[in-house]
Image (cartoon, rainbow, N blue to C red):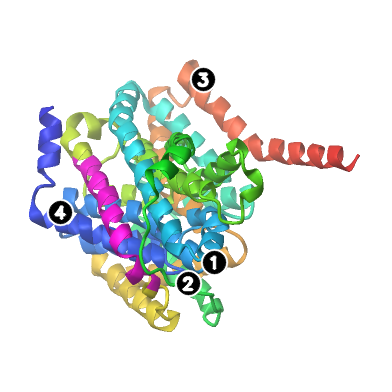
């Protein structure tokens, strides 16, 4: 209880509360603006938080992460253009309800279900993270190596057109992570006699380039795209009777979203799609889905916001990102001198409770903002892209230079932006690359340590049952797309006959 009181006490500083609420406002605005995303905003925010203490800096990013997940539903409902990938499932019934003249009701359902899912996942987080960390304290380098390999295999199911593209993107991230001096042997790798590369490539300019500049170049192709905009006058809260009818859908999606979020590399998009599918599967009115049914809104919204809290569990307890956004938060933790994992939770538990408190304040904050700011958010969707994206470019340049006061980082950002644009153009998602960049270092370090412990005998790794379990899960994860393809073809052949 002392750690809880100390952690929550860190948030009572008015400056910290202001940063958290500022993160909420930025997150909702970023989510509400088509083309912008939470990972982009977090990537741009990282270099500007260097001057802050770790608690307010990470709290602001966590608040932005939570609010941005909710904010994407605003454009999904009002203009049928999801502000964030997880909100794509919300648009399936949210926009039809808005077209029927009930945009306020749709926003109200999205707001209440988002907050419920987010708070539920935070309750799980506060109990699951210390429990998982206590188990992970028994891990040796070989167990961490097997866990990191399993997390990399989960990249196959992240966003993108194909599992193979995601794995290739993750492999490129691992390769980039090997640039510089090897910590164990001192050997230079891929430096090409460039002094700035001896310590490796700073991840902050890479993140800004991939998520901000790359998305800017990608969105430049659709500047003239027009949306049918629906203006909401007020958010209408669902009635008690309606909430009673939807309670099992919200609870089911909250449990599902939290579980999906805890799995490494899955994230909110997968949770939202599964939340929508399960809401339809259990519904007594399946034929109404797609025409503006409340279940089609609360299902994905509760799931994707629950996944946001669930994804923080492996990020803080194991140092394994649970999603693309938490990979950026993990990078920020490392930048502030922390090593996420079991020792972080056991040695500084007050820090974990502070993050929990920040995310709880964020959920309650966007509840208030979502209820009173519907009219304002409907106006935000009218901001022209020609004014928005130049500002993003300026922030990208300033943030990249501010991180290390080096023009080399600016060039890294520009090159990463072009690479990110080409990746998205050919169906490669930048999120697996970032996950590979962060997890690659963990894979390399733990593998080197394990080889030193076992006198370079690789087969001694299999003496650990935990290593065998993670390797088995890795094989299942890598083969799951093939099984899914086989199942779909078999089902199609059965339907054809």
Task: Quickly name the residue at label 1.
Answer: 99
- Residue 309 belongs to the span the image colors magenta: no
Camera-nearest label, 2 or 3: 2
Task: Quickly name the residue at label 4.
Answer: 17
Camera-nearest label, 2 or 4: 2
Marks 4/1 in contact by CB < 8 Å: the verdict is no
- What residue span does the magenta drawing correspond to? 354-378
Image quadrant in which you'd find residue 486: top right
- Confirm whether residue 431 shows in the render: yes
Marker disc for residue 462: 3
Residue 435 percent coordinates (x, y): 45, 48
- In this view, which residue lies farthest toward the right? 497
Kindly report the distance in space between the C-alpha atoms of the residues bearing marks 4 and 1.
37 Å
Kindly report the distance in space between the C-alpha atoms of the residues bearing marks 2 and 4.
33 Å
Marks 2/3 in contact by CB < 8 Å: the verdict is no
Marks 1/2 in contact by CB < 8 Å: the verdict is yes
């Amino acid at each position: 209880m002392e750690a809880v009181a100390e952690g929550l006490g860190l948030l009572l500083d008015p400056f910290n509360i202001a940063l958290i609420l500022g993160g909420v406002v930025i997150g909702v605005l970023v989510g509400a603006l088509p083309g912008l995303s939470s990972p982009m905003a977090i990537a741009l925010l990282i270099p500007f938080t260097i001057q802050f203490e770790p608690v307010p800096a990470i709290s602001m990013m966590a608040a932005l992460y939570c609010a941005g997940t909710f904010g994407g539903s605003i454009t999904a409902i009002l203009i049928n253009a999801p502000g964030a990938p997880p909100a794509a499932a919300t648009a399936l019934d949210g926009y039809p309800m808005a077209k029927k003249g009930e945009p306020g009701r749709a926003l109200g359902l999205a707001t209440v279900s988002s907050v419920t899912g987010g708070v539920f996942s935070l309750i799980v987080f506060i109990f699951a993270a210390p429990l998982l960390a206590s188990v992970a304290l028994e891990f040796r380098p070989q167990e961490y190596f097997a866990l990191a390999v399993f997390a990399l295999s989960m990249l196959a199911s992240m966003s993108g057109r194909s599992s193979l593209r995601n794995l290739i993107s993750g492999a490129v991230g691992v390769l980039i992570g090997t640039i510089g001096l090897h910590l164990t042997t001192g050997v230079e790798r891929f430096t090409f006699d460039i002094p700035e590369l001896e310590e490796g490539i700073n991840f902050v300019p890479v993140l800004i380039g991939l998520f901000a500049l790359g998305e800017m170049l990608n969105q430049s192709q659709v500047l003239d795209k027009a949306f049918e905009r629906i203006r909401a006058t007020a958010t209408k809260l669902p009635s008690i009777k309606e909430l009673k009818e939807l309670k099992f859908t919200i609870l089911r999606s909250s449990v599902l979203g939290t579980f999906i979020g805890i799995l490494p590399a899955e994230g909110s998009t997968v949770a939202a799609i599964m939340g929508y599918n399960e809401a339809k599967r259990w519904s007594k009115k399946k034929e109404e889905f797609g025409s503006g049914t409340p279940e089609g809104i609360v299902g994905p919204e509760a799931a994707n916001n629950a996944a946001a809290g669930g994804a923080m569990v492996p990020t803080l307890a194991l140092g394994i990102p649970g999603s693309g956004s938490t990979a950026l938060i993990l990078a920020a933790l490392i930048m502030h001198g922390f090593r996420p994992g079991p020792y972080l939770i056991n040695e500084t538990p007050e820090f974990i409770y502070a993050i929990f408190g920040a995310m709880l304040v964020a959920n309650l904050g966007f509840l208030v903002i979502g209820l009173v700011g519907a009219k304002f958010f409907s106006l935000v969707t009218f901001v022209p892209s020609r004014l928005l994206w130049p500002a993003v470019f300026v922030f990208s340049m300033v943030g990249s230079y501010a991180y290390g006061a080096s023009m080399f980082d600016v060039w890294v950002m520009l090159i990463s932006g072009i690479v990110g644009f080409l990746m998205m153009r050919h169906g490669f998602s930048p999120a697996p690359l970032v996950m590979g960049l962060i997890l690659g270092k963990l894979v390399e370090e733990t593998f080197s340590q394990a080889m030193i412990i076992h006198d370079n005998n690789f087969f001694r790794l299999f003496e650990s049952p935990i290593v065998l379990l993670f390797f088995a899960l890795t094989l299942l994860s890598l083969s799951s797309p093939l099984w899914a393809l086989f199942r779909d073809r078999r089902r199609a052949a059965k339907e054809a006959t």
